[in-house]
Amino acid sequence: MAAIFKREVRGYYTGMVGYVTAAASLFFLGLFFTNYNLMFASSDFATVLYNTTITMLFLLPAISMRSFAEERRNKTDQLLLTSPVSIPAIVLGKFLAEMVAFAAPLAVGLIMPLLLTAFGSVSLVSAYSALFTYLLLGAACLAVGTWVSALTENQIIAYLATFGLLIVAYLMNGIQTMFTSGNLLALIVFFVVLLVAAVLVGVVCKSLTTGCAVFCAGAVMLFVLFLARPTWLLLAFDGVLSALALFEPFNGVVGGMFSLSAVVYYLSVIALFLFLTGQALERRRWH
């Protein structure tokens, strides 16, 4: 695992990805810190982190897209999968390297709350709790991107698919409101979610027929349930959509309260998608 980790970290910084993402991350972090904390004399560092979450939608897919898609494009994936290193060690090594590329620029964030103490009272516990949860949020997004990268050999597709999934998660609160309203727009969004799921199934199975069958079967079920028992459908999906609101637990931490449930949620998401990544690699190992 250590060898894979070192190779991946070196890969990020021998190319442009590590430097570009670090520069963009530092630029927006510094911009919001200057405008909100320094110019407006606010001691709330958590809000600065909240304002930068939207940059994750663009930066984190760029970090995760190359993890396994590049291996498949270069035809080195089978060499990696048949090496003495176990699948979990491969996945973990690559994921930790992604975390280094994401977290390294945030080392500056460790200093920012301390700078604010020179101008007044600052809750360092609240600031560093928000920063810790922010790192977990980024790790969860990277885990999603790593899984997507394991499903394709095209880095552009991996980037766009991860970006699409993250933006849906980012907007999930608004989408959830549409679901609970029970209007026609909600049904349309259901079909969009089903279409994304069917495409993923088709990619994993490498079968257009399978993807179409999943979409058709799901569409019939959605339509019948929406007409016959709309309450059942909305309640069931409301619970699912709450779980898919990846950014919402962090938004709660921004209010100043450390949330153990948010930590457990993000660790669960990380574990789930790293497990799915491992399963995708196991499937490729034997085909």
Image (cartoon, rainbow, N blue to C red):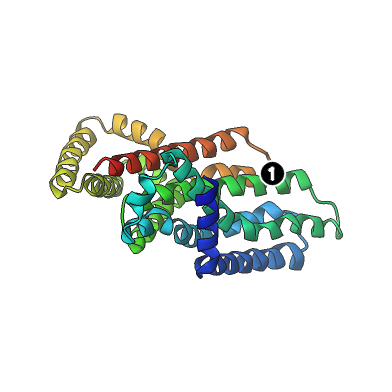
Question: Quick check: 72 left or right of 261?
Answer: left
Q: Nearer the viewer, residue 256 or 69?
A: 69
Tell me where residue 160 appears, x and y as whole percent: 36, 60
Q: Residue at x 23, y 36 (%)?
A: 226
Question: Quick check: 282 left or right of 99?
Answer: left
Q: Quadrant of residue 249?
A: top right
In the image, residue 14 sits, relative to residue 267, either above or below, namely below
Q: Does the image show residue 111?
A: yes
SS for callout 1: helix
Q: Residue at x 51, y 56 (%)?
A: 7
Tell me where residue 128 appears, x and y as whole percent: 71, 47
Residue for badge 1: 129
Tell me where residue 275 appears, x and y as whole percent: 42, 37
- Pointer 1: residues within 10 angstroms few (<14), some, or many (20+)? some
Question: Quick check: 196 left or right of 165?
Answer: left
Question: Quick check: 46 left or right of 102?
Answer: right
